[in-house]
Amino acid sequence: MKKIILISLAFMLVFCSCGGYEKGTDDYKKEESATASDARKSSDEYTKELNEKLKKIQDLIDENYLDYQDKNIDPEDAYQSALVGYVAALGDKYSAYYPPEKSQEYTQAIEGSFVGIGVYAVFNEEEKRVVIAGVMDNGPAKEAGLSEGDIIMKIDGKDMAGVSLDDVVALMKGVEGTRVKVSVKRDGEEHEYELIRRKIETPTVAYELFEEKVGYVAISAFDTVTVKQFSEAIDNLTEQGMIGLIIDLRNNGGGNLYSVTELSDKLIDKDKIVLYTIDSKGKREDSLTKRDDKIDVPVAVLVNENTASAAEVFAGCLRVHLNAKLVGSTTFGKGIMQQVFPLGDGSSVKLTMAKWYLPDDSNIQDVGLVPDIEVTQSADSDKDDVLESAVSYLTEAQ
């Protein structure tokens, strides 16, 4: 049985944690809450005071602060940091303020695409430089001849010695159609390549058909591009005559719920609930399948403690509607969702705004999904014990 190895982007942001809210029903708590609310200032008053205080602080900094570290603090950076702290004060690690640059990175992450040259990169402590860990098949770097192990020496003529991974990656990214010169060291010799940046789709799905005619699909994230990649994988495996399907969601931290609904639509009957959400005002919204497609083979889903959020929605939905068996260990337990709100200047704020529920009305916040077939990977085994168990189950299910 072949092993598929998925290499994650070293510079890809991972967004996964937990949170939620509880509503008090005790009369004493209600009275206490009402009193506190009456004494509390309005949002407008707080905003006015905040602006006034920030101005006073900035004036004091301008007049008195000794910049003994010669860091030349930019007032814009301080302003952005203040906004980050303001949202962080909610105490919810899912909610966050993103300055324009970070907001763009986040958008690219959930879309599953970016503009660059198409390499995976890591920082090599021994070399004190960024090294290419892999080259994407569909990128300019592959076409130009860059390869795994190349040490990045210069970008546009600037020495990259000691430059952080994030900064090197940022220099390789840019505006679509623009040029970038990348110098690398390979076998002791330096080579320079001039590349044209372009939009690149991140591979989030890998698949193959095992000898047992069991299809295997590994999903690393639920991005926008995942929908097309998953559909192609299922179509290809179906054409090859698969008799069972394994979907590997281990270490999948989630993504956007739109993708989950679209993927479910590929496997489940029309008008079935994938999930529903209930927001802070008590409003319910259902996500339903829209097509008549349905898979007619037994399904097993591989999960572990790092299977979270949208990945848990997908696993739970398949268990409810297809009687799919979850194999592995209990999942992370994130039953809340966030929404990103653009702020008009390129920045954005991400806020927790609803709980989500599976079709069986369960919410898994802080609980997770308990597997139907619990398997712990043996440290002494040179095989993938979880995967082997799923293959055995599907083979016996025929």
Image (spheres, grey):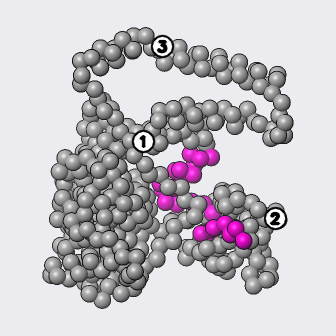
Q: Please name whichever residue, 24 or 200, is drawn nearer the observer in this view of the structure.
A: 24
Callout 2 crowding tier (Cα within 10 Å): few <14, some 14–19, many ≥20: few
Q: Secondary structure under badge 3?
A: loop
Choose the circle earlier in sequence order: 2 or 3: 3
The location of residue 76, given as percent across then percent down, is: 70, 34
Disc 1/disc 3 C-alpha distance (Å): 27 Å
Q: Secondary structure under badge 2?
A: strand
Q: Amino acid at mark 2?
A: Asp
The image shows residue 394, relative to residue 276, as above or below, that is below
Are the residues tagged 1 and 2 within 8 Å (C-beta)?
A: no
The location of residue 248, given as percent across then percent down, is: 34, 70
The location of residue 80, given as percent across then percent down, is: 64, 35
- The residue segment tinted magenta is 101-126
Q: Which residue is mark 1?
A: 339
Q: Amino acid at mark 1?
A: Gln
The image shows residue 326, relative to residue 72, as above or below, that is below
Callout 3 crowding tier (Cα within 10 Å): few <14, some 14–19, many ≥20: few
Query: Does residue 309 appear in this view?
Result: yes
Magenta span has 120? Answer: yes
Q: Which residue is mark 3?
A: 41
Question: Which residue is most to the front?
Answer: 380
Q: Which residue is mark 2?
A: 159
The location of residue 84, given as percent across then percent down, is: 58, 36
Choose the circle earlier in sequence order: 1 or 3: 3
Q: Please name whichever residue, 126 or 254, is drawn nearer the observer in this view of the structure.
A: 126
